Amino acid sequence: MTTLDSSKEIQKNNSEVNETHEDFRMFGLITFLIADGMTFAGFFAAYLTYKAVNPLPDGAIYELELPIPTLNTILLLVSSATFHKAGKALLKDKNSDSQKWLFFTAFLGIIFLTCQLFEYFHLPFGLTDNLFASTFYALTGFHGLHVTLGTLMILIIAWQSRINGGRLNSQNMFPLEAVELYWHFVDGIWVILFIILYLL
Amino acid sequence: MTISIDPQKTNNESLQPKGWLRYFSFSLDHKVIGIQYLVCGFLFYLIGGTLASAIRIELASPMSDFMPRDVYNQVLTLHGTIMIFLWIVPVVNGAFGNYLIPFYVGARDMAFPRLNAVAFWLIPPSGLMLVASYFVEGAAQAGWTAYPPLSITTPQSGQIIWILSVLLLGGSSIFGGINFIATIIKLRRPGLKLMQLPMYCWAMLGTSLLVVLSTPVLAGTLILLSFDIIANTGFFNPVLGGNVVVYQHLFWFYSHPAVYIMVLPAFGLVSEILPVHARKPLFGYTTMVFSIMGIVVLGLVVWAHHMFTSGTPPWMRLFFTIATAFIAVPTGIKFFNWVATLWGGKISINSAMLFSCGFIINFVFGGITGVALAQVPFDIHVHDTYFVVAHFHYIVYGGTVFIIFSSIYHWFPKVTGKMLNEKLGIFHFIITFIGFNLCFAPQHWLGLNGMPRRVAEYDPQFQFVNQISSLGALLMAISTIPFLINVFLSVRNGKKAGDNPWNALTPEWLTSSPPPVENWEGEAPLVEEPYGYGKKLSEQK
């Protein structure tokens, strides 16, 4: 595992290679995502408990509009598909196609965040107004943090899949696959979040 | 896809410092990281132990005369947090896990060496931050559980530093857990089956599953708590419409499994040590494995037994009482298996063996009081009294810390190539065992008679028993001295150990002491029977 960071270094040392092992970086990532999912599970459990046992005081405002989050759901689902396209293109060593799809995915992520901020600014309640408001901002904010990190990582791998001097190709797919899995995970969390926060 | 590894030697020779300096570097060698965990943890153990002594000095008299009441609260909070998050969890998981697991699975290092080093280097800064919080505006005062609304109303800076520190330590723990799961499942030597692994691997697999599943929930909870403290939200603040019981549920969803995170690796370690010094195969290997996995599953669904006085509805009390009582079954299986391992064995009475036997005795005490505490009527009677303190310390000190010392005596020859002095070791065991029981056994009585925990003052009728307890604590404090002398003397001029001083069969003894950088000179040996003791040499593979 010591030279995984650079495929060049692996090639350089190929003459001295004395052992091989299976690539389990994806296994580690999945384990990490299970852990990350448990954080969200804790938040969801807290939210649902509050909903069940802590009635809001009279006059508390907790109205949510559906159009923006619905648009956001569609944006993220489409971005999952475009990311998949990027992976397919890279598998065929079509780096420029892959790069286009990645930039498009990142663009969708940025639109998502913009819509989210737009919603924040136009909601009739603030962070400390009532328990529902606090939980709403904590949940969507924590998810938004994940989307922000994901978008940054997509931009990084888009830069790395450039044709001249880029590191990503059909032989070195792992960075793209890892970010893709993370992105699908963030999408999946959003769908659950959308259902229990906006629809329930 | 497969990955080629270049010989790590080239990497180590060029990048890593030599000698003792490597213990202060960002080393990727799992053995160096294991020792880093152990020494760092032991330094925090000395700090936590000093705080414990301060608590026992205060409690030697009924009045609050040794330190102010708020300082007492800070001391007990720091003592609990340091002992759990900076001593027990990192040492029993990180130190021994990092040192032993790659040997046991026949690997040259952990699955993710860089992640491993990151996980260790998160610990010293967060520990120092926690200790330093005392000098800012006073450390956290809400106990290691940080229950709101107490944690919201006490001075904020200490509590926030506490939260940050525990978040970092939780992150370190999760990274370690991911690494252990990947190493045990994916990095096994070809030909080594899961059911041939030494028991410590199973214990670490179970522990790491608990770490990965429950620690993130604590992280989320503490983030919400910090919002309550800094941003004035009301998640756990009843005044603002929040719900304190939700915090307790989320907190104990981590912190009950945390008890197993602290004790399961000790189960694994004792299962390694007993067969070697009793010269018998480990009794009931398969039942041991299933017991560990049973404890992992049950351990995740018993958390509300900490909350019987928090207004839990009757059905919840019934469920959690029954689930908790069920944990006694796999734990009991393990206990009887250890006794059966000793039964009729050729036992050598040395320090490692004595500490392991001490563990078995103390642990069965703590286990019995644990079953008692799971019963609602009894729990309501002794809730938040010294009975709980006694129970907890019987598990965590009498159980896990005894095994940490036992493991140090057992693996010291492997790590340093020198033997520890047995006379000093046996002396260390005797005063630790007497001191520990003198300190904590009387606390059962105090709790049954209603002395509340976490309070600096108490009814004068309890003074005599508290003084016995403080005397025990003094013995425990003294017991560290022969141990430290022993370690320093033995490192400098201890008897040469040789590769395998105990004639053990587990893989770490099949290499030189101390082991070379990549663990084995040639290919990793295939150990199919790690506990094949008591056979004629010709029958051994």
Image (spheres, coloured by chain):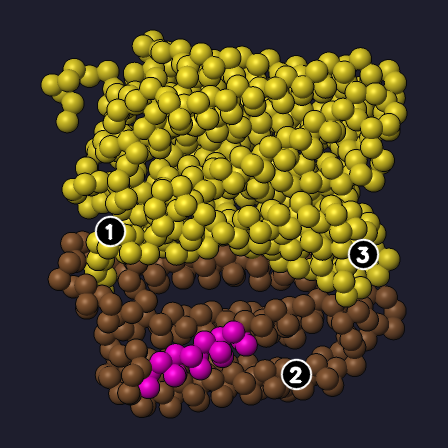
Q: What residue is rendered at 62% in x and 58% in y?
A: B220
| Residue with the mark numbered 1 | B9
Above or below B28: residue B285: above
**Chain of the residue under label 2:** A
On residue B237, which mark appears?
Answer: 3
Q: Is residue A148 magenta?
A: yes
Q: What residue is rendered at 39% in x and 51% in y?
A: B27
Q: CA distance from mark 3 to mark 2?
A: 27 Å
Chain in brown (letter): A
Above or below B242: residue B143: above
The kind of residue tagged 3 is: Asn
Quarter in which the N terminus of chain B is drawn: bottom left
Q: CA distance from mark 1 to mark 3?
A: 56 Å
Q: Nearer the viewer, mark 1 or mark 2?
A: 1
**Chain of the residue under label 3:** B
Which contiguous range is marked in magenta? Answer: A147-162
The kind of residue tagged 1 is: Lys
Q: Nearer the viewer, mark 1 or mark 3?
A: 1
- As helix, strand or loop, the secondary structure at mark 1 comes to helix
Quadrant assignment, res A41 = bottom right
Residue B518 percent location from the top left of the image: 26, 45
The kind of residue tagged 2 is: Leu
Chain in yellow (letter): B
Q: Is residue B440 left or right of residue B88?
A: right
Q: CA distance from mark 1 to mark 2?
A: 51 Å
Quarter in which the C terminus of chain B is drawn: top left
Q: Is residue B117 left or right of residue B197?
A: right
Q: Are marks 1 and 2 in contact (CB under 8 Å)?
A: no
Q: Are marks 1 and 3 in contact (CB under 8 Å)?
A: no
| Residue with the mark numbered 2 | A117
